[in-house]
Amino acid sequence: MKKIKEDGMRILLVEDSPINLKMYQEMLRLDGYAEVISARNGQEGLQKFNQDNFDVVISDLDMPLMNGPEMIALIRQSNKEIPIILWSIRINCQAVRNFKHNYPEVIILEKFPRSISGPHQIIEELSKIEQSLNHQP
């Protein structure tokens, strides 16, 4: 796995809600993550993933055209190492439990507004990912 570039992590943020997308982009920007590329559904996210290089993918669970788990399954076919964070309001639903069983390495977080700590959890997880990637040979 590659080290994080000196100028910071490149993040692919996939979220269908324009309000949530803007909120998360701003939150990440304020925390120093300047390179955040957005997509509005899994299909667009997969297309951007295949056309560019990213250090981490953050995705919503429920989206039109292609949901988060479908997109992640396709990403995993070509890249088994990229860190992925999946978030959802429906964190305890059967689909999320099945997904976690098949992809235990994917970080799954409860999405704001259900969990007020949701945005902070994303920043914490990104910090952990950044530290682990920077410490690899």
Image (tube, rainbow, N blue to C red):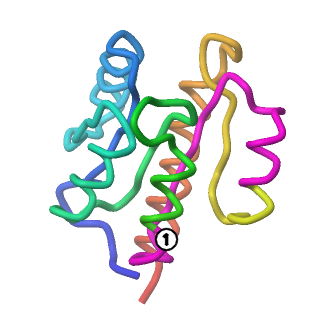
Q: Quadrant of residue 90?
A: top right
Q: Quadrant of residue 52?
A: bottom left
Q: In the rendered image of this protein, does residue 90 appear above or below residue 48?
A: above
User: Is 63 in front, or is 118?
Assistant: 63
Residue 92 is one of the magenta-drawn residues: yes
Q: The magenta stretch spans which residues?
A: 76-99
Q: In the rendered image of this protein, does residue 81 appear above or below residue 118?
A: below
Residue 137 at x, y percent in the picture: 42, 89
Residue 22 at x, y percent in the picture: 30, 17
Query: Disc 1 designates what residue?
Result: 76
In the image: residue 20, left or right of residue 37: right
Residue 71 at x, y percent in the picture: 45, 53
Residue found at x 53% / y 63%: 73
Which amino acid, by three-letter code, is at mark 1? Answer: Arg
Q: Quadrant of residue 41?
A: top left
Residue found at x 26% / y 53%: 10
Q: Quadrant of the N terminus?
A: bottom left
Q: Would you call the spot at circle 1 few (<14 residues within 10 Å), some (14-19), or many (20 or more)?
A: few
In the image: residue 55, left or right of residue 75: left
SS type, badge 1: helix
In the image: residue 11, left or right of residue 112: left
User: Is 48 in front, or is 133?
Assistant: 48
Residue 2 is one of the magenta-drawn residues: no
Residue 122 at x, y percent in the picture: 54, 36
Label total for image: 1
Residue found at x 40% / y 29%: 15
